[in-house]
Image (tube, rainbow, N blue to C red):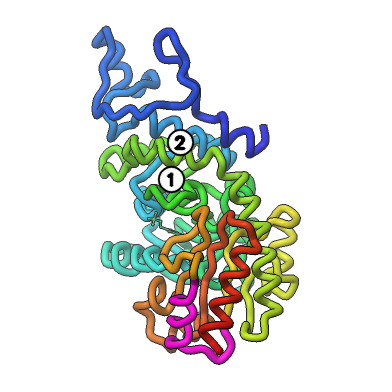
Amino acid sequence: MKLDTLAVHAGDRKRTGSFVPVTTPIYSASSFFYPELETLDRVFGNEIPGQNYTRYGNPTSNALEEQVAALEGGEWALACASGMAALHLAVTAALADRRKSIVAGPVLYGATIRLLTEILVPAGVEVHFADPADPPAFEATVSERRPSCVLMESITNPMLRVTPVDAVVEIAHRHGALVVVDSTFATPLLLRPLELGADLVVHSLTKYLGGHGDVLGGVVVSRDGFRPVLQAISRTVGGVLGPFEAYLAMRGIKTFPLRMARQCANACRVATWLAAHPRIERIHFPGDPRHPDAAVVRRLFPAGLYGGMVSFEVKDAGREQIFRLLDSLKMIVPATSLGDVHTMILYPPMSSHRDLAPKHRQRLGIGENFLRLSVGIEAPEDIIEDLRQALDSSLA
Ligand SMILES: *Cc1c(COP(=O)(O)O)cnc(C)c1O
């Protein structure tokens, strides 16, 4: 079945007693039992599937997990309390019983960098960074460091570089490393890393999959072999998603393919308009034919789909002009997060990349004039009109 169909059907409509609910209800129960204790004993023993305690699993979360596993082409998924909880779980699982060494992409979500450098490094994990856009240098680092885990984001934030996931998998596996891909920005509409050989895929459900700005959650999707280790860690550490959040995420995901297709189309319109605007110095958009990873985009993404994010630099603007610009917006929401139905704009020097020294930011390509737009599902004319009036009125 196709993605659009799976989003609507996968995980739902399990028979409960004599009837079938059309959507999965919220099972708020913290524990479960059976008419015969024998059955509960076998559930505890993992001999038969079933429910016993919500930290071990929950019917609402299980339905969401089935839905996301279907979208990613994975065998199994585990819903977590946040995207960060999911990343921590995936990386911990990839390191379990193996050399405590990670090679990570050079540009990562801010909290992911902190997870690596402030939580894992002090716990004795070796962490090195390497850029897969330069395959020989990347392979040299992997070969020298012999990591158990290679961690990448499929589309990086906020430069929107596109990772050659196929090449990363090939190099990592040749050197015995597992590959964890944070695919939050690409979503399964653009890329399904498991189908390219990746071992674990992580999403922040908070972003495109949930899509409505009303739920925080994460998920790890895997091939079946990882189920025991993921389950063992999660059942002990307990960073699982609650059933109310699982319900909201599942409801959001039913329209995810529709929303994302619209967001991708809107992003193309907005990027083209921005690129031609006299006050815009430069755009960063995977659909731009001059994008540094244009060849990777052509190889990995379906034609015409480049994601819903557009970054851009405003000509001769500093912090003060950028603040005026954002304060002039009438519809676009100047809040953190991304992937929601409403268009959002973020100033990385103030938020996601606040803790970096300006020099370090500059090295990453993030100047004081840099903005990141998460394009929503509104009429594209209205998004463009809001940007136009804000650029005109604030930079006059
Ligand atoms: C938001 C985000 C996360 C963290 O997800 P939370 O749900 O906020 O914990 C991780 N990676 C990427 C790429 C993100 O955008």
Q: Residue furthest bottom?
A: 316
Q: Quadrant of ligand 1?
A: bottom left
Q: Which mark is residue 219?
A: 1
Check disc 2 and report the residue beneath it.
Answer: 65
Instruction: Classify the position of the N terminus by image quarter.
Output: top right
Residue 235 lies in magenta, yes or no?
no
Instruction: Report the span colored magenta.
Output: 314-329
Residue 216 image point, x, y percent = 37, 50
Query: Depth check: 137 or 163 in front?
Result: 163
**Is 388 positioned to the left or the right of 126 in the image?**
right
Dot 2: within a 10 Å radius of its alpha carbon, few (fewer than 14), some, or many (20 or more) residues? many
Q: Quadrant of residue 229?
A: top left
Q: Mark 1 belongs to which amino acid?
A: Val
- Which residue corresponds to the image point at 44% horizontal and 76% vertical from the top-left? 327
CA gap, disc 2 and disc 1: 8 Å
SS of the residue under disc 1: strand
Instruction: Classify the position of the C terminus by image quarter.
Output: bottom right
Residue 317 lies in magenta, yes or no?
yes
- Which residue corresponds to the image point at 26% horizontal and 44% vertical from the top-left? 237
Residue 285 image point, x, y percent = 64, 69
**Is 3 positioned to the left or the right of 143 in the image?**
right
- Which residue corresponds to the image point at 49% horizontal and 33% vertical from the top-left? 66
Residue 290 image point, x, y percent = 73, 75
Query: Depth check: 49 or 130 in front?
Result: 49
Q: Mark 2 belongs to which amino acid?
A: Glu
Q: First in sequence: mark 2 or mark 1?
A: 2
